[in-house]
Amino acid sequence: PQTVVVYTLSSELSGVQRNWYLLDHEFFEERSKRQPYPSPMTTLRTLRYFSLWNQAVAHLIQDLQPDVYHCMDYHAALAPLYIPKECRVPVILVLHNADYMGIVETDFINNRFWQTVPALRRLGVVFNLKKSAIRKYMTFEGRFNMLKAGVAYIKEVQAGHGVCAVSANYGVELKRERALFNGLPCIMALDNATDPAEDQGNTGIDTLKKQRFQAKEALQAHCGLDQNPEAKILIFIGR
């Protein structure tokens, strides 16, 4: 058994309570600045990382019982497999770049245990799952595939409803070109927020520059920063 430490951060904005849960374990810290996930994807250590990560996420879901589990891409797509039926919550799987499916070339793993135990058995041991579950949820086109787990789970439990793409065009492309998504009734496009303001038509360069400085000044005031029109502002939008 492994111990994962959970740190909690909370804040309130406009009457809405927001909570962040940060998971800490030595496996999760073995990353470089250039690689947010362990590399290469051909080591037993990598499989153990994703196994522990998904089991930890599953425990959080059981404890918190959220209204929905928002799963982004393959990294935690195995988590629903560890949740008992009575604790299940609806799953939304959002695809940002389905070219990355969490495929691990297990044939290249160089480990004594790995070389002497049958393939499904060793995967079952690492992921704490039965061989039947590995075969059903995590094997696609003869390879170990973590994204398959999320897709197969949604097909089985939610009749295929709950897979989304970042745009309508990308959803159509995935349905057309990726066999993994065959059998889904649809891949829904995210309902991305849009500015309800009316289009003001063509705007001159001078007007845009003026609005830019006005916006910077307002942002600096809102965030309690120095009022400096020459200051560089870095904005990060991510996950």
Image (cartoon, rainbow, N blue to C red):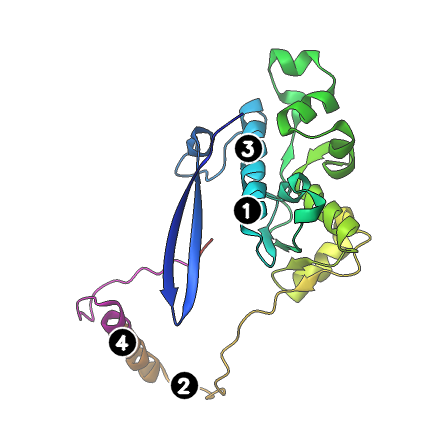
Left or right of 169: which side holds 160?
A: right
Q: Amino acid at mark 1?
A: Asp
Name which of mark 1 and mark 3 comes first in the sequence. Answer: 3
- In the depicted view, which residue is nearer to us: 59 or 208? 59
Q: Is 227 colored magenta in this rendering?
A: yes
Q: Give the label on residue 159, or none.
A: none
Residue 109 pos. (x, y %) = 62, 20
Say if residue 142 shows up in the picture.
no
Disc 3 designates what residue?
52
Mark 3 vs mark 4, CA separation in Å: 44 Å
Q: CA distance from mark 1 to mark 4?
A: 41 Å
Q: Is residue 220 left or right of residue 116?
A: left
> Could you tell whether 182 is left or right of 150 in the image?
right
Q: Is residue 108 magenta?
A: no
Amino acid type of the residue that numbered disc 4 sits on in the rendered structure: Ala
SS for callout 4: helix
Marked residue nearer the N-terminal end (1 or 2): 1
Residues at marks 4 and 2, CA–CA distance in whole angstroms: 21 Å
Q: Is label 2 in a helix, a strand or a loop? A: loop
Foreground mark, 1 or 4?
1
Question: Sequence order check: which comes first, mark 4 or mark 2?
Answer: 2
Numbered disc 3: secondary structure: helix
Residue 186 position within the rendered picture, expressed as x and y whole percent measured from the top left: 76, 61
Q: Which residue is mark 1?
A: 63
Instruction: Pick whichever, 101 or 79, lies toward us.
Output: 79
Tell me the residue at 71%/58% (across/down): 173
Judge the density around disc 3: few (<14), some (14-19), many (≥20) Cα neighbours within 10 Å. many
Q: Amino acid at mark 3?
A: Leu
Q: Tell me where the magenta segment starts and ends, as one range.
A: 218-237
